[in-house]
Image (tube, helix red, strand yellow):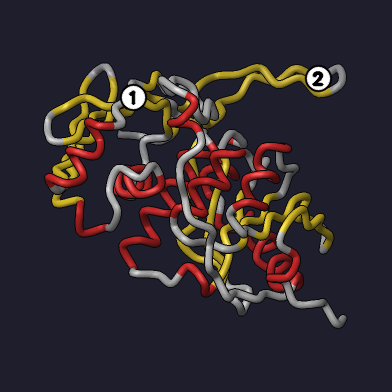
Amino acid sequence: MKVTVELPVIRLQSLLRKTQVDSIAEEIPVAFEYNGIAHTVMLATPADLEDFALGFSLSEGIVEQRKDVFDVEIISSESGITLRLSVAGDSFVRLKERRRSLAGRTGCGLCGAESLAQVMRDLPPVLSPVAILPAVLYQGMARLPTYQKLQQVTGATHAACWVNGAGEISHVREDIGRHNALDKTIGALAKTGFEPQSGAILITSRASFEMVQKSAAMGVGIVAAVSAPTAAAIRLAERLNVTLVGFLRDEQCVIYTGNHLLLENTQ
């Protein structure tokens, strides 16, 4: 399925009026089914869907490890895409115990949770020994736009990626939803058997409660965002021992929690 569509638009610049064709980011319903049972529907960009399926399953605690997902079948129809996941029996039992029906909206985060207990998951503090120079985060965020191919064409997508201790970025994934982009990156990382203490997650959005929770669930010790965090995200990062960085741009940032994980910049 295409990730963009070409549509005619009228562009106004001062007194000039010009008709042209623009590339528009596609947004379609993506349904998740586990062992034949419908679980949730998210609006998403129809790209890297296997990564999305794996990352969502891991970050939401539906499965505990990659090997718990046996297969992902991608079914396209006129109404959207269905991701049919075959998961381990223990995972399916756990899913049924904490069953919730979500009607996913772009960036909705936790909309649809059936109880307050489902919002605040019982996660252990991150025990990450990672120590990264601020310059490494600056370097990673500065490089990220060159990898955002869909954003360059449409101007409508968020991105998430991994940055290692040398400032090298990898596993860049894009989506119209910031949570979806992060899940796709998590899924791509899980396939490689990455070590969460070896780097940081970068996101081109604000740092919400759920972005911190998803990262901490994977054992990631540093989350750095181009925009601001929410107060709930800061409280959660403090509780889960996550270094939360915001306004990461132009070789500047604000450290909200866990600055002990960042080495001092000696420049």
The earlier-in-sequence mark between 2 and 1 is 2
Residue type at tag 2: Leu
Residue type at tag 1: Arg
The CA distance from mark 2 to mark 1 is 51 Å
For disc 2, the marked residue is: 16
| Spot occupied by residue 79 in the image (x, y as percentages of width and height) | 27, 17
Say which quarter of the image contains residue 260.
Answer: bottom right
In this view, the residue in front, 20 or 186, is: 186
For disc 1, the marked residue is: 100
Question: Can you say which quadrant of the picture contains the N terminus?
Answer: top left
Give left or right: position of 37 versus 164: left
In this view, the residue in front, 157 or 262, is: 262
Front: mark 2 or 1: 1
Q: In this view, does 24 lie above or below 91?
A: above
Q: Is residue 259 above or below residue 237?
A: below
Residue 139 in view of the camera: yes
**Residue found at x 33% / y 24%:** 100
Q: Is residue 187 above or below residue 251?
A: above
